[in-house]
Amino acid sequence: MAKRDFYEILGVAKGANESEIKKAYRQMAIKYHPDKNPGDKASEEKFKEAAEAYEVLSNPDKKAKYDRFGHEGVGGPGGHGPGGHMNMDDIFSNFGDIFGEGGQFGSFFGGGGGGGQRQRVGSNIRIKVKLTLQEVAHGAEKKLKINKQVTCNTCSGSGAKDKSSVKTCNTCGGSGQVRRVQNSFLGQIQTQSTCPTCHGNGTMIAANCTSCHGSGRVFGEEVIDIKIPAGVSEGMQMSVNGKGNVPERGGRAGDLIVQFEEIEDPVLKRDGQNVLFDLHLSFPDAVVGKQIEVPTVDGKVKVTIKAGVQAGEILRLRGKGLPSVNSHGKGDQLIYVNIWTPQKLSSEEKAIIEKLSQSENFKPKPAGHKGFMDKIREFFS
C-alpha cells in the first residue's frame, strides 16, 4: 500500500513554514493520541502516521530531500521509513517541545509519563449553605462540619497493617505502569498503561490495616472555615480546594463545592443588586409629610417623606443595595410608597373626612401627575 503524502497527513500546504507544520502536528497528536483513544487501532495508526510525517517535515534537510524525491528520499536505514525503527519513547524524546517537559510519555495529557505513578484524586463533596440578605450584603464567615472520608490515622493512609506489610508490586516492579511493545511499519511502538495488579500504586499490601481494612481512609468529620464574599446570589457556588473526600491509599483529596441559597427576608426583597421595600403610609402622614425610619441591609435609616407624596411613588436610597461579586459599587434600595386607606371609621372620623372632601385641596387633580407605569418607565430609563 502506497504511503500517503506527508503534507496531506498533517493537512498543510507544501510551502508551509516550520511554525505551521509544528502546530498542525500538535493538533493531530492530541486528536489521535493513544491515551485519548484507548484500544482504537485506527487512531493509533493515524498517530504513528502523523509522527513520521512530522519527523521528516520538521527537519530542513529531510524536508528538502522529501520535496525533491518523495518517500524514497527519506526511507532506508537512515530514516524512519520501511527500514527504520521508531518506538514511542523515540517520538516523545524527539518531540519533547510538542508533548511537554522532558518528552515524557503522557506528560502533555496529564497522564503518568516516564514510568511515574498517576496521582489519585478523591471525589468532590457538594453542600448547600443558606445566607440571609444581610450576609449576602456584607459577606460571611461560616464554620461547616463536613462528614466525609478522611485519612486513616492508624496506617497514615497506606492501608497496611505495618511497614513490613507493604511489598513492591511484582507486575510493574514498583513503577505503577506496565509497558507494551507493538510492531508497526515504523518499527516497534512502545506504550504505557496503569498496572492492572496494583492499580498504579506500585505496591501491594500483604496484611490490611485493621481500622480501615486496607482502604487507607475512614469515615469521619472535619470542621472547615470558609469566607463567603459579599454579593453572591442564589445558585452561585465556590470551591474549597482539597477539602473533599480523600482517595483510597493516598493521593490528593477532592474539593468541597459550596452552593449558596438565599433565605427570604420578611421585609426586604432582592432584585439583582437592588433591594426593594414596600412602605405603607397612613393617609394623614402622606398629606402632611413625616420623617420615618426604614430598614436596610445596613440597619435602619431615617427618610424624610415630603408632604403630598403620592401612592406609587418610588424613593431611591443610593448605594444602599447589594454589591456585585465581579465588580465595584453597590445597587440601590428602592422604596415603593403605598398609602394605607382605613376600612373602618368612627362616626366622628367619618364626619371629619366628609368635611375635608368638600375642600378644594382634597379634590383629585391628575393633570401633570404621571401614572404608575409612566413612573416605572421613567425611573428605569
Image (cartoon, rainbow, N blue to C red):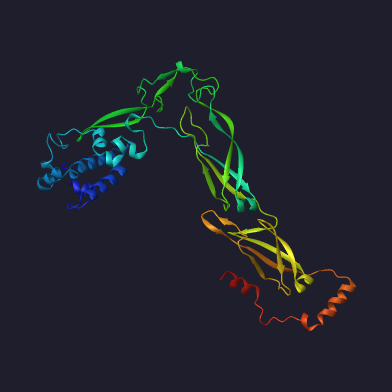
Task: Say above or below: 60 vs 270.
Answer: above
Task: For the N terminus, give its image quadrant.
Answer: top left
Q: Total of numbered circles in the picture?
A: 0
Asked if residue 42 can be seen in this view, the reply is no
Residue 112 percent coordinates (x, y): 36, 33
In terms of image quadrants, where is residue 317? bottom right
Q: With 30 as the anchor, is 210 left or right in this view? A: right
Q: Nearer the viewer, residue 142 or 187?
A: 142
In terms of image quadrants, where is residue 99? top left
Residue 22 percent coordinates (x, y): 24, 46
Residue 145 percent coordinates (x, y): 61, 37
Q: Which residue is drawn at 70% across and 65% down?
A: 303
Q: Residue at x 75, y 71 (%)?
A: 289
Q: Which residue lies furthest to the bottom in this view?
A: 360
Q: With 309 as the anchor, is 208 left or right in this view? A: left
Q: With 346 as the anchor, is 241 left or right in this view? A: left
Q: With 322 as the anchor, is 111 left or right in this view? A: left
Task: Say above or below: 356 vs 17.
Answer: below
Q: Which residue lies furthest to the top in this view?
A: 164
Q: Which residue is drawn at 33% across and 29% down?
A: 115
Task: Say above or below: 227 vs 275.
Answer: above
Asked if residue 145 can be seen in this view, the reply is yes
Residue 161 percent coordinates (x, y): 50, 18
Task: For the C terminus, give its image quadrant.
Answer: bottom right
